[in-house]
Image (spheres, rainbow, N blue to C red):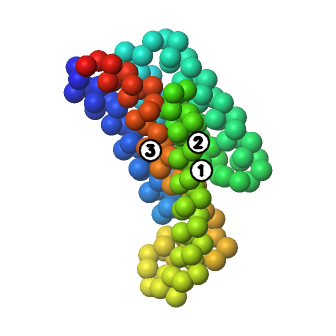
């Protein structure tokens, strides 16, 4: 049983890393990644032994972050894939990990943006010989793949989330 729970819990970091890699290389986060995280949460939560109230609270956090993400998307601060990824990250993290999720995502976004601004200045001459995605990433006025910040924030906050707390409660 512990192996099944551990495998189910591994879905979150694997898909978060996949989302970040996709955002860096294509500037998109596939809907199938967000849908897989959405669908995978509920069996994982119940397998992990979370109560119905905790699952509902996690769902509320996910919905709140979806609304916030939709607002940021409407303001053109983030893309639609980022908004969906942010929502499913909140779903998996829940209320106990919400503050760390917001803090780490903000910190990760700031640091990644600073690195990208710096890299766009001094690495631009080297970008032309690299892969297409790397050249696009280093365009002086190019977009920032914010899915990287969301994934970093979610991975850093995951240990404080409801699912990990439930997993540790099994021992």
Q: Is residue 100 above or below residue 163?
A: below
| Quadrant occupied by the C terminus | top left
Where in the figure is residue 125, as x and y percent of width and height? Answer: 52, 88
Tell me how far mark 2 sits from mark 1, CA to CA.
6 Å
Q: Dot 1, how many residues are within 10 Å of its Cα: few (below 14), some (14-19), or many (20+)?
A: some
Q: For the residue labelled by badge 3, is the local secondary structure a helix, a strand or a loop?
A: helix
Residue at the extreme right: 75
The one of 43 and 110 positioned closer to us in this rendering: 110
* Image-based side of 60 in relation to 167, left or right: right
Q: Dot 3, how many residues are within 10 Å of its Cα: few (below 14), some (14-19), or many (20+)?
A: some
Q: In this view, does 124 lie above or below 103?
A: below
Q: Which residue is found at the position 47% from the left and 85% from the top? A: 126
**Cβ–Cβ below 8 Å for labels 2 and 1?**
yes
Q: Is residue 24 visible?
A: yes
The one of 74 and 148 positioned closer to us in this rendering: 148
Where in the figure is residue 92, as x and y percent of width and height? Answer: 48, 31
Q: Which residue is found at the position 57% from the left and 75% from the top? A: 118
Where in the figure is residue 84, as x and y percent of width and height? Answer: 59, 41
Q: Is residue 29 above or below residue 64?
A: below
Where in the figure is residue 11, as x and y percent of width and height? Answer: 36, 37
Residue at the extreme bottom: 125
Q: Which residue is found at the position 33% from the left and 19% from the top? A: 169
**Sequence-first tag of 1 and 3:** 1
Q: For the residue labelled by badge 1, is the local secondary structure a helix, a strand or a loop?
A: helix
Residue where numbered disc 3 is placed: 156
Res. 67 image quadrant: top right
Res. 83 image quadrant: top right
**Cβ–Cβ below 8 Å for labels 2 and 3?**
no
Residue where numbered disc 2 is placed: 102
Residue where numbered disc 1 is placed: 106
Q: Can residue 33 be seen in this view?
A: no
């Amino acid at each position: 049983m512990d192996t099944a729970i551990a495998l189910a819990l591994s879905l979150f970091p694997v898909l978060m890393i996949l989302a970040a890699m996709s955002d860096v290389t294509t500037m998109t986060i596939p809907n199938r990644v967000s849908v897989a995280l959405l669908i995978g949460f509920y069996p994982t939560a119940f397998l992990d032994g979370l109560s119905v109230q905790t699952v509902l609270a996690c769902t509320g956090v996910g919905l709140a972050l979806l609304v916030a993400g939709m607002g940021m998307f409407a303001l053109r601060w983030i893309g639609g894939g980022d908004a969906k990824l942010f929502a499913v990250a909140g779903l998996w993290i829940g209320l106990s990990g919400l503050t760390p999720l917001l803090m780490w995502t903000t910190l990760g976004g700031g640091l990644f943006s600073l690195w990208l601004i710096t890299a766009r200045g001094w690495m631009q001459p080297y970008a032309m010989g690299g892969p297409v995605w790397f050249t696009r990433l280093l365009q002086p006025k190019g977009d920032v793949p914010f899915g990287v910040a969301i994934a970093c924030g979610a991975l850093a906050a995951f240990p404080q989330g409801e699912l990990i707390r439930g997993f540790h409660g099994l021992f």
